[in-house]
Amino acid sequence: MSNDDPTGPDDIGVVEIAGAAARFARGLVRPRPVDRRLLASIEDRGLPAGDVTVTVRALPQVVRRVPAVGVVEGAGLGLLPNAMTTYVVEHPDATFLVDPGYCRDAPSRAIAELPWLARLLVTPPADTISSADGLLAHPPTRPPDFALPTHAHWDHVCGLLDLPDLPVRLRTTERQWALDGAHAPAGGVRSSLSDGRPIIDYDLDGPPVATFTASHDLFGDGSVIVVDLAGHTPGSVGVLARTTTRWVLLAGDAAWHTEQVQRVRQKPAIPGEFADEDRDAAFATLHRLHLARHRVHVVPTHDADASGHLCDGRFSQTRSVDDFRYGGLE
């Protein structure tokens, strides 16, 4: 039960819920199996060369514990730490925010617009910190120059409501889906991205990087690379950043928790079927993240443990990326 949102109207039907519930129950016993053929076909193209580095810092956030069975298909009993994290990336030429996901007065400005099932599942703690307040309490060395959401769901963009003049860089595919389609993603997404706000489109015009099929070099120096993580939304991306200690991949909601990456486990049918735009594509992306984890520190936005390594702007070496409860595949 991640802090994520389904898209669509506020009338999720009984038939839809019943079908998803049946698939949820089946997934508890028989999770979707790893696609070994796909895994074997994925080629690792390596990481860009260069000596420019950036800092990646997670703004402090309130953490809540959510049932693992609502985050990782087939998970056992237990709770996982979940948070609505915003990241500050500082490059020598610019500072930018990744996933400014929570606004002041969010219950009335964003959450009230969500379908009833989403409100039931994802409403965060009352003391959740807005992106703007997190910046005030822990300011970067220079004010943010722009925001780069990994995707256009409410809990990754509504913090922009408190930052009205901040430009946004959004993948063209994602902008078209979020702003030009017949149905807006729920939760104040269009109001967060409109009202005269500068939107700077970009495309994944670069070569494959690591295990990902397309890329965009944000500064032209190989230090920050946007990569394709489509599936959760049509234009979902990850932000791959070279720090002084290792590469970090801010993976948005391609996974809700690192255990999904470690075990190649999709989101459970409830709420996953109401959150992922393309379940098959999202599952394929998990395979790419699973293999990439050997090279980079994969950080799902809502995984509070993974984000906790980044609270001081440096990758913490106190816990290996593979040091999780379950053994990994290769």
Image: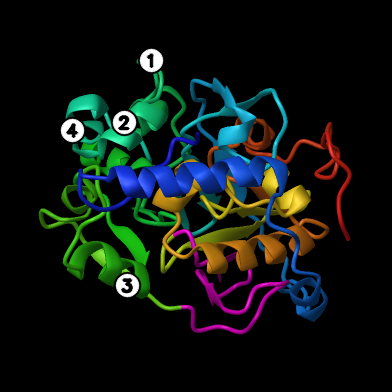
Cβ atoms under marks 1 and 4 closer than 8 Å: no
- Specify whether 4 is left or right of 266: left
Q: Which circle's residue, 1 or 3, is located before the other in the chain?
A: 1
Residue 114 lies in magenta, yes or no? Answer: no
- Calculate the distance from the C-alpha at mark 3 to the C-alpha at mark 2: 31 Å
Q: Which circle's residue, 3 or 4, is located before the other in the chain?
A: 4
- Calculate the distance from the C-alpha at mark 1 to the C-alpha at mark 4: 16 Å
Q: Which mark is residue 127?
A: 1
| Location of residue 172 with respect to 58 vertically, above or below | below
Report x, y in % for residue 245.
78, 49
Label 3: which residue? Answer: 201
Question: Is the residue marked by circle 4 packed among few (<14), some (14-19), or many (20+) residues within 10 Å?
Answer: some
Q: Which circle's residue, 4 or 2, is located before the other in the chain?
A: 4
- Specify whether 284 is left or right of 211: left
* Mark 3 residue element: strand
Label 2: which residue? Answer: 119
Question: Is the residue marked by circle 1 packed among few (<14), some (14-19), or many (20+) residues within 10 Å?
Answer: few
> Which residue: 83% across, 34% down?
325
> Which residue: 51% across, 50% down?
253
Question: Label 1 amino acid?
Answer: Asp
The answer to whether residue 77 is visible is yes
Q: Which mark is residue 109?
A: 4
Question: Is the residue marked by circle 2 packed among few (<14), some (14-19), or many (20+) residues within 10 Å?
Answer: some
Q: Which circle's residue, 2 or 1, is located before the other in the chain?
A: 2
- Calculate the distance from the C-alpha at mark 1 to the C-alpha at mark 3: 34 Å
Depth check, mark 4 against mark 2: the one in front is 2
- Specify whether 38 is left or right of 6: right
